[in-house]
Amino acid sequence: MARFEPFSTAPAPERAILVGVDLGRSEWSCEESLAELARLAETDGAEVVLTMTQRLDAPVPKTFIGKGKVEELCSYVRNLSADVVIFDDELTPSQQANLERAVGEPVKIIDRTALILDIFGVHAKTHEGRLQVQLAQLQYVLPRLRGMWSHLVGEQTRGGIGSRFGQGESQLEVDRRLVRARISTLRRELERLERRRGVQSKARWDSGVYRVALVGYTNAGKSTLLNRLTGAGVYVRDELFATLDPTTRALDLEEGRKITVTDTVGFIQKLPTMLVESFKSTLAEVRAADLVLLVVDASDPHRELEISAVRSVLEEIGADRIRCVEVMNKCDLLDADELRDARVSHPDVQFLSALSGEGVHGLLYRIAQEASADSVSMTVLVPYDKGLLLKMVHERCQVIRESYVQEGLLATVRADARMAATLAPYSVEEEG
C-alpha cells in the first residue's frame, strides 16, 4: 500500500461566467451565440459555471450592461467563486476598466475578442502564425494599457521634489511607445514573409498548377478532409481553431492533372477585425486560389448561419468572386431522412464524410470538372528536346490520348488558357 495518496498536478480549470446582451441586430440569437462562446471558453480550458443575458436596445456606455445586472454579476462572482467573466461582445477599454472595478480583483473581465486571441496564441505553431497572433494581441492591448504604474501616480500627489514630472503618466507613455515599436517591427517582419509567400504563390501561378483552398467555419472538418484527399497528416481534433497555420499539399487527379489543396484558418462569427488584418498573408492563399471549397458541418443546426459568416469573411478579404463549391461534411452524422432533405434543398452541393471517405470520390470528380471548365482541346507535337514542356503536358493537362512518334510526343490534350497559349506553337491538325 502506498504511503502517500497521489494527487493531480494539472492546473484547475478557471471558473467562467458568460455574459451576453441581446440587441436584436444579429442573425444569431443571443442563446446560440453564447453556446458558441461556451465552446470557445472550454477550448481555452475554462469551466462555464453560469450564463447571464440581458435584452437592451443599445449597450450601456459605462458598463455595457445595466447597473442592476452589474450588481447581479458581482453577486454571482462571489457566490460561485468565479475566476473570469467573459462578455460575448467586444468591450471598450473604459467599459472593461469600470467592470473590473465593480467586480474587484483578482477576477478578470475579458470579451470574445480577447478569448479568441488567447486561443490563437495557444494554437499558433509556425513562426508566421505566432507573429500574426502577437500583432493582433498587441493591437488589442495597446488602448487598454492602464493602471500598471498607479503607485507612482500616488507618490506624485504628495508633492515635493520630482512631483512635477508625473512619473506614472510618463511610464505609461513609455509602455505605449514600446508596444507601438513592437507592432511596427511585427508588421515589417510579416510584410517580409508576405513578400516571400507572394514569390511562392507566383511560382505556383507560373507553374500553372490548379489551386484549391479549403475554407469554412471552425471545426467543420477541413483538416480531416485535407488528410483524406492528400494524406497530409495534419493535426486534427474536435475543438475550435485546432489548426491555424495553412498547409498546402499536392494531389494528382485521376485524369493525370496535378493540383494543390490548401487548408486555411477556420472562420467564426464576430471574428475580430484585427485578426483578419493580421492573418491577411495567410488568407492571401484563399485569394490566390482557382477554386474555393466551402466546407460545412452538415450536422450543425446553425450551418446556414455559419455559411453566411464564412461568405462574409470571404467578401471582406476580396475572395468572394472566386469560383466556390459548397461541401457538406460529416454526413455520417445525419440519418437517412435528414440527408435526403439536405440533398433536395442543396442540389448543387457535394455531400461527404471526410472521416469515413464516403462521397470523397464524387468531390474529386467535381474538382476535376471545375479544373477543366475553361479548358480547350488541342493536338500538339512536342519535340523530345523540350523536356520541361513534356513534363508540363503530363502534369498540367488532361491527356486524352498520346503516342510517341519520330518527331516527338503527339498528344491530344485538354489545357487551360495559360497552358494552351504555351502549347500554341506546337499545335498540329489532328489527322482523321
Image (cartoon, rainbow, N blue to C red):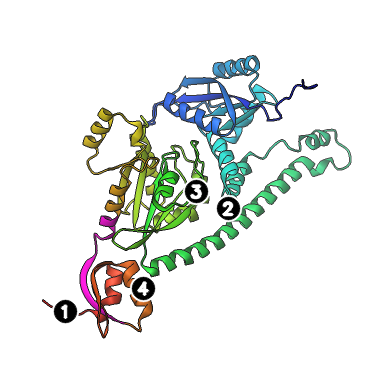
Label 3 to label 1, Cα distance in Å?
47 Å
List x then y, in percent, for residue 9.
71, 30
Task: Name the residue carrying label 3.
Answer: 234
Sequence-earlier tag: 2 or 3: 2
Q: Nearer the viewer, residue 23 or 247?
A: 247
Label 2 to label 3, Cα distance in Å?
13 Å
Task: Name the residue carrying label 2.
Answer: 126
Are the two marked residues, 1 and 2, in contact with CB atoms closer than 8 angstroms? Answer: no
Q: Which mark is residue 129?
A: none
Looking at the rendering, the stretch of residues picked out in magenta corresponds to: 368-383
Are the two marked residues, 2 and 3, in contact with CB atoms closer than 8 angstroms? Answer: no
* Above or below, comparing residue 366 to residue 385 in the picture: above
Badge 1 local density, few (<14 within 10 Å), some, or many (20+)? Answer: few
Are the two marked residues, 2 and 4, in contact with CB atoms closer than 8 angstroms? Answer: no
* Residue 118 quadrant: top right
Sequence-earlier tag: 1 or 2: 2
List x then y, in percent, for residue 255.
28, 61
Label 1 to label 4, Cα distance in Å?
22 Å
Q: Nearer the viewer, residue 192 or 10?
A: 10
Task: Name the residue carrying label 1.
Answer: 429
Sequence-earlier tag: 1 or 4: 4
On whether residue 245 falls in the magenta region, the answer is no
Task: Name the residue carrying label 4.
Answer: 391
Residue occupying the far right of the picture: 161
Question: Which three-letter amino acid code belongs to the residue tagged 1?
Answer: Glu
